[in-house]
Amino acid sequence: MKKSILAGASVLALAIAAPTLAQDNQSTVTQTGNTQSATVTQTGSNAISNVNQSTANNSATVDQAGDGSESVVSQSGTLGTADVDQAGFDNLSTVVQTSTNNDAVVDQDGTDNISTVNQIGEDGIANVMQAGLEGDSTVTQTGINNTATVSQTSTTNNFGDRVRLTDGTDGAGGDLVRGSFSNIEQSADDTVADVIQNGELNRSEILQTGDGANASVSQTGIFNNSQVEQTAAGVANVTQGGAYGDNNSLINQNADGATATVNQSADNTLPTFFPTNDSAILQNAATTASVTQTGQQNDSSITQSIGSTGSTATVTQTNALGGSLDDINSSVVLQTGASNDATATQNGQGNSSEIEQSGSSNDATLSQNGSFNASVILQSGNGNIGNVQQSSRDNISELTQSGNTNVANVNQSGVESDSIVTQSGNISDAQLIQTASASSSTIIQSGEELIARVNQAGTNQSSRIEQSSPNNPFPNLRATVSVTQSGADNTSDVFQSGDTTSGLSNGYQFTGSPIAGFGNSPTASVVQSGTNNDLDLDQTGSSNLAVSNQNGTDNEIVALQTGDNTFAQIGQTGISNLVDLTQASTVSSNVGLARAVVNQTGNDNRATATQNGTASGFFSTNLEVTQTGNNNQSDSIQSGTNDVAFVDQIGNLNRSTVTQNAGGVSNFADVNQTGDDGLSELTQSGTNNRATLNQDGVNNDSFITQTGSGNIATVTQTSTGNLSNVNQTGTGNTATVTQGGL
């Protein structure tokens, strides 16, 4: 600050003789125009006032009641009004008015304040009040009908001088900062700028080059930095506060109708000398951005580019702990589409959030309540809804929606869990809930009208769902997958890639004449409850339906359905059960199917079924296995056409093998083992053969082979250690074997 100081022996003598009188003041008034008015009042000491008026009808009032203040008023336009009141000490005020009907009011009641008002445009209003210490204010108005208000109040500078760069950080080559700094530049028309700074070492800069721009800044605390650039008629509001602010805010508005609101509050115990809360908003369209950051070390970036008209972005971050840079909450919102809505809420520390919206009319909501969670939402389609909730810590979530009108909800409340949801089709629904730790889930939907739901409650669970249905001629039929896992170390893999081409409904029934209907298929439902369960299901084709239920320990299901109109329902209750099922069918009529029902209750059971048939008429291969007991095993292979096989094992250590070879037509096999240690092998390769086996004893063996046509074989074993061997190669043969007591 440059001060004019007059000193000499006569001045010292006057001060001693009359200390209560104003002394050594200087006033210069120069008027060269018409109807000029200047009033200068100096009641302090060592004050300097210069008033220079030209042209006409200007008014200047200078009141200096403090000591060592200097005022310069230069009015070369018309109808200018300047009112300068300096009651503090060593203040400097400069008012320059070169156009018409400008009004400048400067009130400095502090010490070592500097105020510069430069009004080159017309109808400008500038109000500057500095009541603090070492404040620096600059107002430049070159447009028409602009309003600028500056209020700076600060106490003693307890932190010394700082060399500060324009971005608010410290660094060599910057400006020397002793108090708060405010700079307002208005080069457009009808702009409004308001700055209120109560604290120390705050910096505010407002640049308005767009007509109708409106900016408001309020900073309380220390080390706050605010920069607003408006090239269009936008509205920007910044509030930064706290015992120690150390906040940094940047707003850049380049489009009419843009609105930005930033509210940052911090309460550091010691200055950190870098922005505690950092907010950057870039708006190139008529959008709305709102940022609220409470606590320490939060980072927010909102970019709304051209084309994002009507979009809204809201970020709320709270970090009460602070700490290192690794503890900073970070939120990034990028909007390039129209009418998008993005909301990010972070409560904790070390959380990372990113939302990118390039489509239109998308809605993204992200909530993080915990620590070190990471979430990404990418929306490039239209009309999508994405919700992600993360609580606890170290969770990772990635949601991508590139289709249209999709809905995805992700909820993670455990620790160190991760999830991936990708929707590239249309009108699909994905629901994912993870409440345990170290859970992993992936949902990929690339078809039309798909539904996937995952609910995991346990430890180290993993679920992966892939759905693809590119062609759905029935909009009311939706491919649905539902997975529920409760326990530990469960794994579920479901793959669906087909389209719904069947109009079958009312569920599946089998009453003498089989009736196929799968409702709104294809559908896969998996329920696993226990420990170390594993399911791998792959469905390719149309009208597939698979239902699985595992309740026990170390269960495993592997199922593959390829073809049309297939059906599988598997239930396991117990421990160490295994099912391996493969179905493949190609139909020539709309009721053809390969059906399988497996139900195992007990311990160490095993069922393997392979069906591969071609429908010709009413139905294709059909299998039903029921095992109740311990250590049972059933192997069934059907590769013919229109074959039916039933296996029912209730005893222990029984083994049944049913083989229906290709080339056979309409064969029927029924095996019932209720005893223990039974062995059954049944092979059918003919046509219209029927085989029925009942084993109720212990250690019985039965072998049935049918290669002819229309043969019937019935074997009943009820005692111990029996052996039966039936071989039919002709036509219309009948064999009945009964072994055991009456």
Image (cartoon, rainbow, N blue to C red):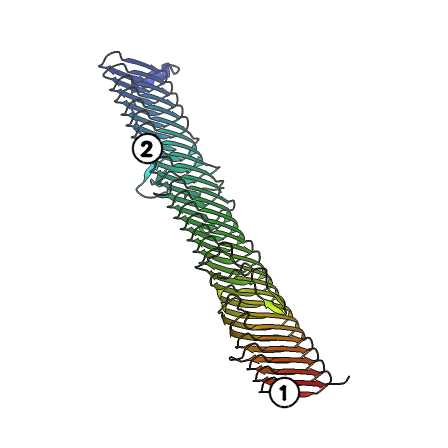
Q: Which quarter of the picture shows residue 623?
A: bottom right
Q: Nearer the viewer, residue 338 or 608?
A: 608
Q: Quadrant of the N terminus?
A: top left
459 over 305 or under it: above or below: below
Mark 1: which secondary structure? Answer: strand
Residue ID for mark 1: 726
Q: Return the residue found at the far left.
A: 32
Amino acid type for the residue under numbered disc 1: Val
- Count numbered badges in the picture: 2
Asked whether 611 or 689 is in front, the reply is 689
The percent position of residue 526, horizontal first and vertical second, equals: 57, 63
Query: Does 171 sit left or right of 570 as displayed?
Result: left
Is the residue 74 above or below the residue 309 in the image? above
Residue located at (32% from left, 33% from top): 208
Q: Quick one: 258 or 337, which is closer to the camera?
A: 337
Residue 626 percent coordinates (x, y): 64, 72
Q: Nearer the viewer, mark 2 or mark 1?
A: 1
